[in-house]
Image (cartoon, rainbow, N blue to C red):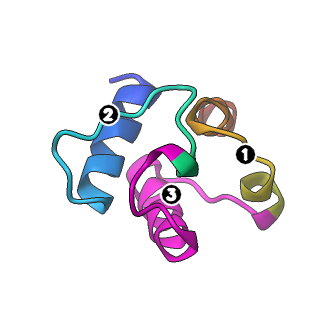
Amino acid sequence: MDTLAKLNEVFRDVFEDEDLTVGRETTAKTVAGWDSVMHITLMMSIERAFKLRFNSGEVANLKNVGALADLIDRKKA
């Protein structure tokens, strides 16, 4: 499964919305309910799903889901 497909599964689970689809250009502004509290929950779920850890600097610099997918791919390599 590619990174973006797996991220979609995590987003659907965290936001409890089976119809939610995220793409590379998706941002917090385009997902209903994605606030600062949900961001923490989301990042923890992503870390668990991909079995990796992010530092606060990495997360702070993310502009969209595409940047997140790229970061995950770099960390997994």
Name the image quarter holding residue 48.
bottom left
- Residue for point 81% across, 49% down: 61
Looking at the picture, which amino acid does disc 2 mark? Answer: Thr
Looking at the picture, which amino acid does disc 3 mark? Answer: Glu
Real-space CA distance between mark 3 and mark 2, rounded to the nearest whole angstrom:
19 Å
Magenta stretch prevailing secondary structure: helix
Q: Position of residue 3 (x, y in %)?
A: 45, 29
The answer to whether residue 42 is magenta is: yes
For marks 1 and 3, give the one nearer the viewer. Answer: 1
Residue in front for this viewpoint, 24 or 69? 24
Real-space CA distance between mark 1 and mark 2, rounded to the nearest whole angstrom:
18 Å
The magenta stretch spans which residues?
30-56
Along the horizontal axis of the image, is 10 left or right of 4?
A: left
Residue receiving disc 1: 62
Res. 47 mark: 3
Res. 21 mark: 2
Q: Secondary structure at mark 1?
A: loop
